[in-house]
Image (cartoon, rainbow, N blue to C red):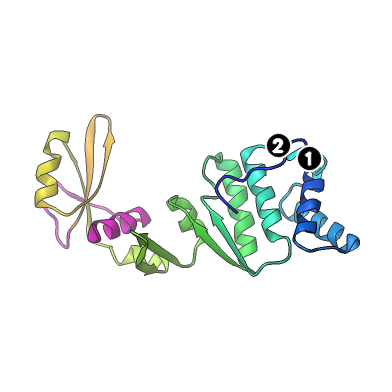
Amino acid sequence: LPQDFDVYPRISAYDLLDHMAVLKGINNGKQRKEAVNALLEQTNLFDVRRKAVSTFSGGMKQRFGIAQALLGNPEIIIVDEPTAGLDPEERNRFHNLLSNIGENKVVILSTHIVDDVEELCSKLAILVNGRITLAGHPGELVESLRGKVWRKDIEKADLPDYRQNHDVISTRLKAGRTIVHVLSDSQPDEMFEQLPPDLEDVYFSTLFANR
């Protein structure tokens, strides 16, 4: 399932999925009808099966994309940035769908959205310049940073000095102030606050180590 999944205009969900089933070699009409209806049910699109897919919301199109990807009963599903642009309700529905699929198939998720990885993945790998630089269980990788992530609010103008003197793994702006996350085995100074690490810290610390 690519990040941008396009469809033929003015064709209903049922007819388009049936057409794709033919292209995937499901030639028996009865088997094809059963497969199409089952996938529309699984992706919660059966009630709108007669509507044109071009009228679907972004989340509904993504679910239709999963339905067509599942045609032919593949053993591996690869999805690229599947929840980008979805509202919270649709993203939650899509997470549940992928979790159910992942009980019986291998699902490979290519994404920069940390929430997707936290909620869906039992294993992760971080790619830097096309090479795997870190891999493991998300919870274990987060735990490996416990006691090592520190936060401080600073003036933006002071950021170059902090980058020079500390291992600054990430920065963000909030209400005109710059918040830095620093990796250190001990408190860098008394104004730093220790933070419970999260998966973003794992990601940024990996990028920092491989810059």
Q: Identify whether 82 is placed above or below 129.
A: above
Identify the residue at horizontal 38%, vertical 69% (top origin).
135
Element assignment for label 1: loop
- Residue type, mark 2 in image: Ser
Q: Is residue 203 magenta?
A: yes
Relative to residue 7, is residue 43 depicted above or below? below
The answer for how far apart the CA atoms under marks 2 and 1 are is 8 Å
Mark 2–mark 1 CB contact (< 8 Å): yes
Towards the viewer: 166 or 125: 125
**Left or right side of 122 for 193:** left
- The answer to whether residue 190 is seen in the rendering is no
Label 2 sits on a secondary structure element that is helix
Q: Quadrant of the C terminus?
A: bottom left
Q: Position of residue 23 (x, y in %)?
A: 76, 57
Question: For mark 2, what is the residue?
Answer: 54
Read off the magenta span. Answer: 184-211
| 29 within the magenta span | no
With respect to residue 171, does 101 lie above or below? below
Tell me where residue 197 sits by quadrant. bottom left
Q: Which residue is mark 1?
A: 11
Q: Position of residue 21 (x, y in %)?
A: 78, 57
- Left or right relative to 78: residue 149: left
